[in-house]
């Protein structure tokens, strides 16, 4: 017979999990920032026949911790720059544990009144921190991918409704064509959202961008003048490689005046609005119709926490509401989470988000953003000073693109850059990844950690320089100077 855990057994299994968590977090600062175990080895560890009988709960937790050892990235560490990934603030993690323990389904306001209430307040705080229109509605999604999807679903419905077509009832068959204007350097998840919504990844008007990946306003205006009918314009706050921002003040008013819905993908860049010295990068973004961002990036909420923000709450409710005879209806003064996201059964994401914002406050988030940007500049300056190395983007936020072998032929520079990235990942002092930028291989550094300080940036920059010198020495002979 399978029996639930007793109070004593529950405490034992949770205490064991806590011990493993504390050990992992305590080691994060000095641990290798890159996994030493690859996918195939990890798969071999986990691979086993389907269990036929129950097992000891405490032993299972110990086994899981042993199986993942060496196979985890270290985004909770201070020198993780591989992707734009936050470090999961401990208070958010603790709140997330409570969320799992409470076992609440945040699908509607009666199933979990407290979960819905936490979302209301956390969403209101986010609007205040980001200085976006306070009347906006906020939906809590898995991440920016689904936040973009949600906002674009609302946009699709709104622009078609404006020409007399109810896409929610009639679908896209026979609907007027929707034109999507989007920058050439938009993030892949935005194109994925367009794909999911039946608007297509390729049926878009791509607008030219400058050397940093920001939309050229003149080209946008020309593209806008050439289209008619339902139109969605997708802009970007924080280009994923360079950190660049589209010229919102020059684009948004013109687009809205033409009847276009303006959506902004601001997965991490919107949080620049929390810092006075960076606020100007986003000037005019508040005039848009919708915005997507992540709480699990700069605010350091645990996964998963995306925020879909829409100025027109009614439009959002029209696009997202899930209704059924067995589901309760919300009164005028109640908020039903299913009216704002494309999910019914889901975890109560508002609790952890509320806890993290409560823990850091406005000043704490601003300090964190400013510090990470300062570290990015420090690293860029050190790397750019090294012979044979160039920083190929304007470091306006937290993103740094580095190319090695700039005094070599293009193909050779690509090879040397790949070799340096591989060398620094083997060294594991820090985690840095690579990407293709405008047809050239570069190292990409994304500085967004909650525990990252100037000393970590300096240590990492020196490790990267050392890796580059080793690569160049082995490839071309000793490095002079």
Image (tube, grey):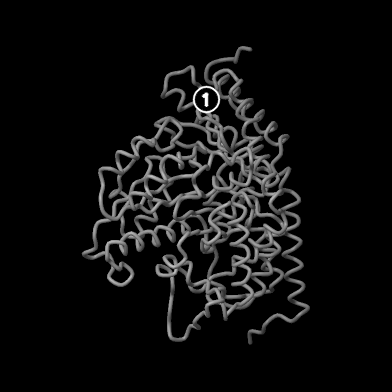
Q: In this rendering, is residue 359 above or below 223?
A: below
Q: Nearer the viewer, residue 14 or 246?
A: 246
In the image shown, does 226 or 325 lie closer to the viewer?
A: 226
Image label count: 1
Please give left or right for residue 315 compared with residue 167 in the image: right
Question: Residue 128, position in %: x, y?
Answer: 61, 55
Q: What residue appears at the point 38 percent right and 59 percent down from the top-left corner?
A: 155
Query: What secondary structure is found at the residue carrying circle 1?
Result: strand
Identify whether 256 is placed above or below 379: below
* Residue positioned 52% across, 42% down in the render: 283
Judge whether 360 appears above or below 254 on screen. below
The relative height of residue 137 versus residue 109 in the rendered view (above or below) is: above
Q: Is residue 395 left or right of residue 61?
A: left
Within-10-Å neighbours for mark 1: few <14, some 14–19, many 20+: many
How far across and how far down the image is residue 100, in percent? Answer: 64, 70
Residue 150 in percent (x, y) is at 44, 61
Residue linked to disc 1: 404
Quadrant showing the C terminus: top right
């Amino acid at each position: 017979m399978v029996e639930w855990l007793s109070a004593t057994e529950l405490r034992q299994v949770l205490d064991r999990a806590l011990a493993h968590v504390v050990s992992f977090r305590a080691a994060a600062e000095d641990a290798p920032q890159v996994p030493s175990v690859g996918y195939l080895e990890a798969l071999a560890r986990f691979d086993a026949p389907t269990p036929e009988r129950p097992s000891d709960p405490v032993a299972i937790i110990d086994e899981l911790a042993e199986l993942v050892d060496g196979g985890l990235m270290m985004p909770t560490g201070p020198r993780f720059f591989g992707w734009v990934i936050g470090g999961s603030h401990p208070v958010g993690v603790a709140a997330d544990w409570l969320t799992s323990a409470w076992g609440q389904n945040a699908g509607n306001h009666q199933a979990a009144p407290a979960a819905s209430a936490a979302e209301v307040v956390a969403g209101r705080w986010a609007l205040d921190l980001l200085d976006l229109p306070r009347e906006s509605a906020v939906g809590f999604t898995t991440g920016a991918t689904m936040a973009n999807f949600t906002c674009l679903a609302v946009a699709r419905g709104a622009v078609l409704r404006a020409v007399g077509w109810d896409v929610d009832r009639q679908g896209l068959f026979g609907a007027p064509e929707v034109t999507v204007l989007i920058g050439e350097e938009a993030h892949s998840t935005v194109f994925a959202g367009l794909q999911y919504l039946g608007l297509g990844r390729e049926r878009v008007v791509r607008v030219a961008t400058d050397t940093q990946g920001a939309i050229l306003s003149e080209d946008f205006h020309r593209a806008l003048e050439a289209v008619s009918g339902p139109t969605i314009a997708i802009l970007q706050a924080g280009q994923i490689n360079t950190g660049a921002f589209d010229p919102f003040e020059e684009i948004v008013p013109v687009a809205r005046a033409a009847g276009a819905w303006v959506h902004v993908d601001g997965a991490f860049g919107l949080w620049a609005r929390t810092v006075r010295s960076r606020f100007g990068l986003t000037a005019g973004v508040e005039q848009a119709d919708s915005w997507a961002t992540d709480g699990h990036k700069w605010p350091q909420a645990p996964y998963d926490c995306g925020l879909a923000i829409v100025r027109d709450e009614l439009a959002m409710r029209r696009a997202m509401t899930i209704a059924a005879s067995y589901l309760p209806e919300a009164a005028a003064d109640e908020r039903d989470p299913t009216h704002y996201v494309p999910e019914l059964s889901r975890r109560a994401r508002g609790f952890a988000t509320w806890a993290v914002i409560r823990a850091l406050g406005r000043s704490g988030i601003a300090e964190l953003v400013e510090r990470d940007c300062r570290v990015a500049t420090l690293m860029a300056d050190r790397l750019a000073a090294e012979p044979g190395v160039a920083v190929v983007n304007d470091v306006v936020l937290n993103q740094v693109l580095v190319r090695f072998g700039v005094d070599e032929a293009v193909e050779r520079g690509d090879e040397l850059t790949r070799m340096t990235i591989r060398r620094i990942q083997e060294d594991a002092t820090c985690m840095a990844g690579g990407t293709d930028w405008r047809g050239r291989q570069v190292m990409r550094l994304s500085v967004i950690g909650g525990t990252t300080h100037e000393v970590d940036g300096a240590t990492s920059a020196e490790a990267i320089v050392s890796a580059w010198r080793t690569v160049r020495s082995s490839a071309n002979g000793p490095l002079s100077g």
